């Protein structure tokens, strides 16, 4: 946007729709990195209740938008997605307990670990 000459501004009344088309592996890696980042910033959360609230909001939204039959067809993917999200985040929160080789394999941003590992022998 900036390269095209536009300016970025903050407008609290604006509405933005934001989405990604991640594969399940990409979801895992993204949330692994999120878990690592929040842990390193001291902002790690283990609020299982909040996670369940988000899940139930997603289920209600999908039911409303898809209808019961399509929702039931979509449910296996939703369960897989949420499992990958949760597993990635949980492992990211505990990355210091994992071997470097797994940390690098799990992360979406492998270049980050190359630099971090070269600075320390163990992450």
Image (cartoon, rainbow, N blue to C red):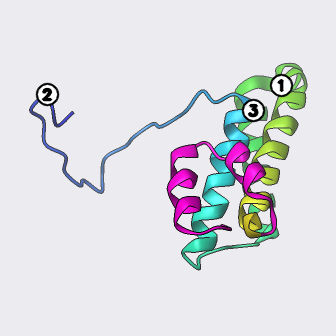
Q: Quadrant of residue 95?
A: bottom right
Structural crowding at the residue carrying mark 3, measured as other residues with C-alpha within 10 Å and reported as few (<14), some (14–19) or many (≥20): some
Label whose residue precedes the other's in the sequence (1 or 3)? 3
Q: Position of residue 44 (x, y in %)?
A: 65, 74
Secondary structure type for disc 2? loop
Residue 98: say if magenta.
Answer: yes
Q: Residue 123, relative to residue 68: is it above or below?
A: below
Q: Which of 89 and 56 is in front in this view?
A: 89
Q: Position of residue 19 (x, y in %)?
A: 53, 34
Q: Position of residue 20 (x, y in %)?
A: 55, 32
Labels 1, 3: front one: 3
Q: Which residue is drawn at 64% across and 63% down?
A: 36
Q: Nearer the viewer, residue 28 or 101?
A: 101
In the picture, measured across the screen, residue 16 lies left or right of residue 55, that is left
Q: Give the range drawn in magenta.
A: 97-123
Structural crowding at the residue carrying mark 1, measured as other residues with C-alpha within 10 Å and reported as few (<14), some (14–19) or many (≥20): some
Q: Residue 102, relative to residue 59: is it above or below?
A: below
Q: In which quarter of the image is residue 12?
A: bottom left
Q: Mark 1 points at which residue?
A: 74
Residue 104: say if magenta.
Answer: yes
Is residue 109 visible in this depiction of the protein?
no
Is residue 69 visible in this depiction of the protein?
yes
Q: Mark 3 points at which residue?
A: 24
Q: Residue 92, relative to residue 29: is it above or below?
A: below
Label whose residue precedes the other's in the sequence (2 or 1)? 2
Q: Residue at x 57, y 64 (%)?
A: 37
Q: Name the residue under label 2.
A: 4
């Amino acid at each position: 946007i900036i390269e095209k000459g536009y300016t970025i501004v903050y407008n609290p009344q604006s509405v933005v729709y934001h989405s990604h088309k991640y594969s399940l592996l990409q979801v895992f890696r993204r949330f692994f990195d999120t878990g690592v980042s929040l842990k390193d910033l001291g902002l790690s959360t283990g609020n299982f209740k909040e996670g369940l609230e988000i899940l139930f909001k997603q289920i209600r939204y999908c039911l409303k938008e898809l209808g019961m039959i399509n929702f039931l067809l979509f449910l296996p993917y939703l369960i897989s997605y949420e499992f990958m999200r949760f597993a990635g985040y949980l492992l990211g929160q505990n990355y210091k307990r994992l071997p470097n080789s797994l940390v690098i394999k799990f992360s979406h941003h492998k270049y980050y670990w190359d630099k971090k590992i070269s600075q320390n022998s163990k992450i």
